[in-house]
Each structure stands twice: as C-alpha cells, then as structure tokens.
Amino acid sequence: MKPDLRVNLGPLTLQNPVMTASGTFGYAQEFEDLVAFERLGAVVTKTVTLEPRQGNPPPRIAETPCGMLNSIGLANVGVETFVREKLPFLSGLETAVVVNVAGRTQEEFVRIVERLEPEVGFDAFELNFSCPNVREGGLAFSSNPDVTLRVTQAVRRLTRRCLIVKLTPNVTDIATVAQAAEDGGADAVSAINTVVGMAVDVYTRKPKLATVTGGLSGPAIRPVGVARVWQIAQRVSVPVIGIGGIASAEDALEYLIAGATAVQIGTATFVDPTTAQRTVDGLQAYCAETGVDRITELIGSLVLPENP
Amino acid sequence: MGLSGSEHQRHRSHFEKKPRRNEVQSFRNQSGNRRLLLTHTHLLQKLTVEKLVEVAPGVFQLRTRNNVLAGRAQPGQFVNIRVTDGHDPLWRRPLSVHDVDRRHDTVDFLFAVVGRGTRLLSQVQPGDHLDVLGPLGNTFPVFPQQSAVLVAGGLGVAPFLFFARQLAAAGVSTVLLYGVRKATQLVPTDAFEELGVLVKVATDDGSAGLPGTVADLLRRELRTQPEDAVVYTCGPLPAVRAVARVLAETPRRAYASLETRMACGIGACVGCAVRVRRRRPNDPTYKLVCKDGPIFDLEEVDLEA
C-alpha cells in the first residue's frame, strides 16, 4: 500500500508536506521547464507587496559556508501586476498555491489581503512578518508578540482561506511570537525565515552585501530551524511548517519528527531545482521502508532521552 | 559573462492522474506549436568530461560532451555547473560557453582557478559527469554588414571563440583585442586566427603586445574602425568600465557580457541584479544578469553604480 502523505494546514489539505519557500521559487513560472509542479505539496510565491519594489542595490547575495546571505529587499512586481500577470499561471497549477504577502504597516497587510481575497486561483496566505532586509515593517512585526497578534487578528477577519504566519528566528523567544499568531487566528505558523548574518571581504574591508547585513539561509541554518520548530511545536496547537536548510528527504524528516506538519524547500532549489520533488520521492520511500502508513504518524514523534 | 483558490478546495485535483509534463510537450510539438518548450530533460544535463587542459598557469580549457547542450547552446550563453555533490561551496558556478563543435557534440569552457569552486572543477577527470543547468541567458546580436571588435579583459575572452565562429560564418570582419596583466596569462589564440580574426594583444607590464590595457587597445583600434563597427566586451567589471569610458569618447554601438555573483541562474533568486538607466519613470531600476543578460547594451547598464 502506498503511504499516505497528505497533511492538513487548517482548512487546507496538501497532497504531501513538501512546499516551496517564498523567495526561492519566483512565481513558479520561472521553473516551468524544470519542475513537475503537480508533484509538490504546495507552491509559495515570492513576497507580494501593495506597490512594486525594485529591491536593494547590488551586491545582493554572498556565498558562505554551506549557505548564502541575501538582501534582495522584497523586489517584486506589486499586487496589481501579480494579479494580472502571475496569478493566472499559478491558478493553473495542479498543486496548492500559497501567496506570500508583506506590508510595512498593519494597514498595508489589511489592504493587500483585501485586494487579493476576491481573486480565485490560490489557496492560502502566508504573512511575511519577518523579512530582515527591509527598513520598515519586516522584523519589527514578528519580533513583537503584541504586533503579531494584532495584525494576524486584522487579517483573519478578512479571509477564510488558510492563513499562515511566517516567523523570524531573530528573536529571544520565538514560541511566544508563534503563540501570538495562533491566538490571532492563524491556521499555521512557518519558521524559520533567514537568520541575520554578515560577511566581510578582508581585502577591500567592505561588507559582502551592499546593505551590510542580510539573511543567512541554506544547509548551514538547518539545526537552528529544527530547534526553533521543536520549541514552537511544544507551545502551539496549530500546525508548524518547518523551513531552513532542507535539501533532502532526510532533512525534511528531521523537521517532521521535531514537530513540523509540513516543510518548505528554499535555498536548495537554487542549486538543484528538482530538490522539492526529490524530497517527495524520498519521503515516500522512507515511509514505505519504515512501515509508516500515514506521514502524519511522524509529526512530533521525537524520541526524547530519558534524562534530557 | 566570464566565470564566474477562494477555491479553497481547488486541490481536489491533486489526486487525479494528470499527463506527465514530457507527454504534454510531445503532444504540443506534434500539433505544430512552434513555441520552444523546454523540459528538465533539456535544461538539466549531464556533461561527460572529455579532457581538461591547463592552457595558461591556473587557466583551464574543459572539453565536455553532450549532444543536447552542443545542439542548443548559442554564442554568449552560459551554463551553471555544479562543482560538488555536497553543500560547500553551495552555489553552482556560471561559465560561459567557450566553444561548441556540433559535429562531435562537444562543448568547451574556459575558466581560471579563483576559489574553491573552480579548484574543484580543475580536478575533474575524463569520464566524470558534470551536472549542468543550461544553456542560460541571451545571445550576442550579430550585424552581418558591420565589422566587429571583440574586447576581452583576461578570462573575458571565454565567450568570444564561439561568437567568432558565428561572425566568421556570417562573413563579418572581426578583430579581437585581448588584454591580460602579463604575457604568461595569455590563452592561445590560434583558433581565432584560424577563423580569420585579427588578434591584438595588450599587457599591463608590456611583456607582450601593446604595453597597457585592453581599453588602450580599443582607443587605438577605434581610430581605424568605421563608425558603424560594433564593439562587444567581456571581462572583470573594472575592464568593462574602462571600455565604457573609451566608448563615451568615441561612441559606437556596444554590448557587454556581464559577470556578477549568481546563485540560481534562472531568475528565481533575484540576486544577480545590475543597475540600468531608466528611460521612463516606471522602468525597472535593476535587471537580472542571468535572465535579462548576460549581454546588455552598454548604454543601458549603469556600471558606475
């Protein structure tokens, strides 16, 4: 019997737990020639904002050991162009579609969700409360439980679609912020966004990114992500989506066992565009080999030492 | 480029059997749809290493065999090569297509060892397989009635051999201006000469050719080139900037193949941004080297930013 890979994120059922991560999969069309979309659990769009954003000056990226720094600055086409030019392609995909949105203020989050809500062709919102590379909003949101609660509540009133809140690891207590998102009515929380990092060119003595600091992603941050997801899963009852450094089914399994209901594949897609679908294949194989009938059996199945 | 729904239940259809992408493609092709549809079977390729030759100290010519890439690559395009199965270094390495032999299905690359990624690439053995994404990017424009001046700074010579072949086939009179720091860094240019390309060299230390930079060579060359000659340049940013300054004094139609840090190569990471001069207020401030380039009209890009 084929293992059942379906998982639920509140009102939304995914055919498998493997999603793409925002900002690493464009608006999916970029991967038309490379990825079998119908094999994925969900596609998450690059962050969409009310107005188009040009993004930060170059250099925007730097390679670091087993990872990379980025400071793209939420470059995107803006919600009107997104609806007109990107959403039609996304709506044709044979997989769930999550639209990631960001605003600088609560008002902007409300306005963008109001604008998108009447549109068809997507299944969920992911609120980006946690971009480290924009001056306003961004980090200020998900580092503050009160703001997280307020904005999540405001958006929750506007939609019955699955509502995901994406959290930053750049806080002292991520579980409290996750709790605030749940209290605000989020159907799921996703974590982690990138870890604030910096690299210096020692010959020019210049930072390797024009914005000096950026967000670290890739395999280097996986243990940070797994720990954060484990902490969040102890606290909240809504599903947790694990993100951070996943490049294989084994990496995804770490997150699921630590308490994640689903995962998102990010930076690894830049290296191998087929990572997400390979991860689905690997999860299927793992379940078959280890006698797991339903992948939900694995969620939070962590075997703790007797005297931790 | 050198090296460098409110359809909340829309998901119901996930469980229906859908034709695989490749089947969709072949159907569309049979129906005569002329749109070029690629699938991963085209863009993700395994190249077989044929040979690796050190053509100058630390500079390698890598010959690979792959019929799909050899058949599809166009002058000016690049590939993104994976240099390790592990995660360090993480990114693929972008390499422009140096030469293609369609009769033998070979694709050559020219690269210098500048870091860990290229060092790993310099250790491949004949028979090894390389995981490659490509061909990627745009191509050099060709003007059959006008002479061409190729301006290469160092490894910027890489994309020009394949392009020189295209120019020769089009009957374009071509000059290669090639600048390096010192003579030992020169990569053999016999293949250019065999195509009838006039090669002129400059070295910073005067150990070969004109003492000076490739920009100095260009300044001199433009005195005798017709006004409709087209300049193509590739090399490190300082060299391309110097070429742009010469062209500011002596305007010619000019194109530059640009190098930037690059992660995905397919326009998803949006990391390889280059500033462009906006003609209208709503034009974009940045374009992507991987998708909009690597070749840009030199007047369009703002290299001083």
Image: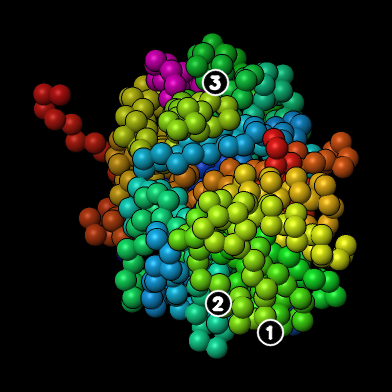
Question: Does residue A222 lie above or below B78 as drawn?
Answer: above
Name the spot of residue A94 as percent of width and height, x first: 59, 58
Residue corresponding to mark 3:
A139
The range drawn in magenta is A169-185
Tag in front: 2 or 3: 2
The secondary structure type at the circle numbered 1 is: helix
Between marks 2 and 3, how big is the CA–CA gap?
57 Å
Picture residue at 44% right of the left edge, 75% below the top: B64
Answer left or right for B128 relative to B150: left
The residue labelled by disc 2 is: B190
Amino acid type of the residue tagged 1 in the rendering: Gln
Which mark, by number, is residue B270? Answer: none
Q: Nearer the viewer, residue B193 or A254?
A: B193
Q: Is residue A176 magenta?
A: yes
Residue B292 position by quadrant:
bottom right
Residue at 60% in and 72% down: B161
Q: Type of residue at label 3?
A: Leu
Per the image, label 2 sits on a secondary structure element best described as helix
Residue holding disc 1: B30
Q: Give the position of the N terminus of chain A as an image quadrant.
A: bottom left
